[in-house]
Amino acid sequence: MNTHGPRVRIAPSPTGEPHVGTVYIALFNYLFAKKMGGEFILRIEDTDATRSTPEFEQKVLDALKWTGLTWAEGPDVGGPYGPYRQSDRKEMYQPYAQELLDKGHAFRCFCTPERLEQMREAQRAAGKPPKYDGLCLHLTAEEVTSKMAAGESSVIRMKIPTEGSCDFHDGVYGDVSIPWDSVDMQVLIKGDGMPTYHMANVIDDHLMKITHVARGEEWLASVPKHILLYRYFEWEQPVFMHLSLMRNADKSKLSKRKNPTSISYYSALGYLPEALMNFLGLFFIQIAEGEELLTMDELCEKFDPDNLSKAGAIFDIQKLDWLNGRWLREKLSPEDFVARTLEWASENNRLTEGLKLSQSRISKLGELPQLAGFLLSNDVGLTPASFAGLKTSPAETLEILNTVQADLEKLMEWNVETIDAELRAVSDKLAKKLRVVTPPLFVAMSGSSRSLPLFDSMALLGRSVVRQRLKVAATVVASMVGSGN
């Protein structure tokens, strides 16, 4: 494939706030490329047209740049194998889909979403794992032509062997065997003409000459589909490496529903990117106690891709705090510390815009910390007493907080206007006036009923911090409901 060193890639989907797990995988690929004298590539996988947005793509780029990672090729820097955004490559996939159809390795499926859901429900009721039952696999060429001529919507699915197993070697898990009868007839091309992840990532990896695919272990079960595509196209397959998922201390999967996972959250709270990368890099190396404080170059020096652990990577926030504290105290000069602090406070224009919003609400400058300090605070110290003065009951307050949290997740853009519109829609949904809905949110965001304008404050705090503060507020209020307070 490539005689000039390995080529690896990170291929995030711009459908939400960049996840710390994305950076975890990116760091592995970066260290691998650097250690092995290869190249690290960034590709944007935006095949999910309904959820992918330019704002989230920019957040991905900003988050990866904040961590200090650099890439040789990508949507922002170009390269010889572009475009590096899948939506810009849409027309490139069609000939390959047609090749699979012509060779008999794929087929058109005309099943409606309703029919597919009924099929899955019946399979689940029978205690079977839901997968496509092959109905359209038996259509004749004439039937397919007739349905196409009639304008019936269709997708393209891949054919799967009916006997035996897919046997392959994984760089982390070793020899793996997955029976073909457990593999679904994957959709390759959706009804809108866009490829699914499975189709696009194989074609893109081949065309971009990717030699090693390192990704999370959740993709291990999909390898047979990818290997089959490499065989169908008669291409050399890359080396696969599936890294253990990041987990909470209780071994549950790291999820934004349980804990903060967005890179922007850790940036907003004042973690140093060097400390976060140091923390994540420790999952990929073997060190003795007392050697934890490491720069990127030192991580690379100790990195050994042949000695990786299958044990889960535990996201221990206390260890991250400890490392971040050491970086602040031991790695920054006083001048660097002051510069980093000012840079952090100015992130997302929080300091400047917060001061502007404060001007008409104070009589002395000394009131600023109490009024606007929540914009820079890690924790606003919410307790049941914080919500005691509200006119809504704890049960009503909890309903407001939970509804707002869920509905804000749907926002494709995050700014004052969209937040304003969404909160007004929530008020309508709850059949409450906006002035009833906003007081609990003032407390959740700032810890006080007297604060800066709510919509502006939420825009400045950012999506990930607002999400976490709503979550904390809901937990506090839920304890009030349970106790009857």
Image (cartoon, rainbow, N blue to C red):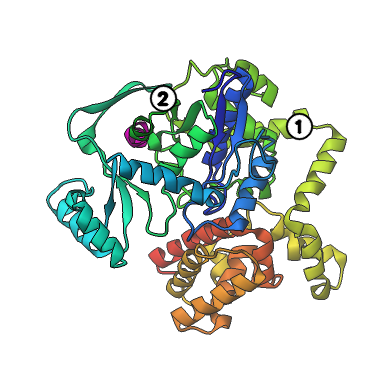
Q: Nearer the viewer, residue 24 or 195?
A: 195
Circle 2 residues within 10 Å: few <14, some 14–19, many ≥20: few
Q: Nearer the viewer, residue 317 or 457?
A: 457
Q: Quadrant of residue 371?
A: bottom right
Q: Is residue 422 left or right of residue 394?
A: right
Residue 162 vertical placement versus 168 (above, below): below
Identify the residue shown where x is 76% and y is 58%.
349
**Residue 29 highlighted magenta (yes or no):** no
Query: Which residue has dot 2 on it?
Result: 310
Query: Which residue has dot 1 on it?
Result: 329
Disc 1 is placed on an element classified as helix
Identify the residue shown where x is 60% and y is 70%.
419
**Closer to the N terminus: mark 1 or mark 2?**
2
**Residue 393 placed where, x, y %?**
46, 76
Which amino acid type is marked by label 1? Arg
Identify the residue shown where x is 55% and y is 29%.
8
View extreme (left): residue? 126
Does the rendering let one see residue 152?
no
The magenta segment is 221-227
Q: Quadrant of residue 287?
A: top right
Does the rendering let one see residue 328?
yes
Which secondary structure dominates the residues rendered in magenta? helix
Give residue 22's mark: none
Q: Is residue 239 left or right of residue 209?
A: left
What distance separates the C-alpha of mark 1 from that of mark 2?
33 Å
Residue 78 vertical placement versus 428 (above, below): above
Disc 2 is placed on an element classified as loop
**Residue 208 placed where, x, y %?**
55, 34
State if disc 2 and disc 1 touch (CB < 8 Å): no
Q: Nearer the viewer, residue 26 or 285?
A: 26
Q: How many marks?
A: 2
**Residue 158 placed where, x, y %?**
30, 43
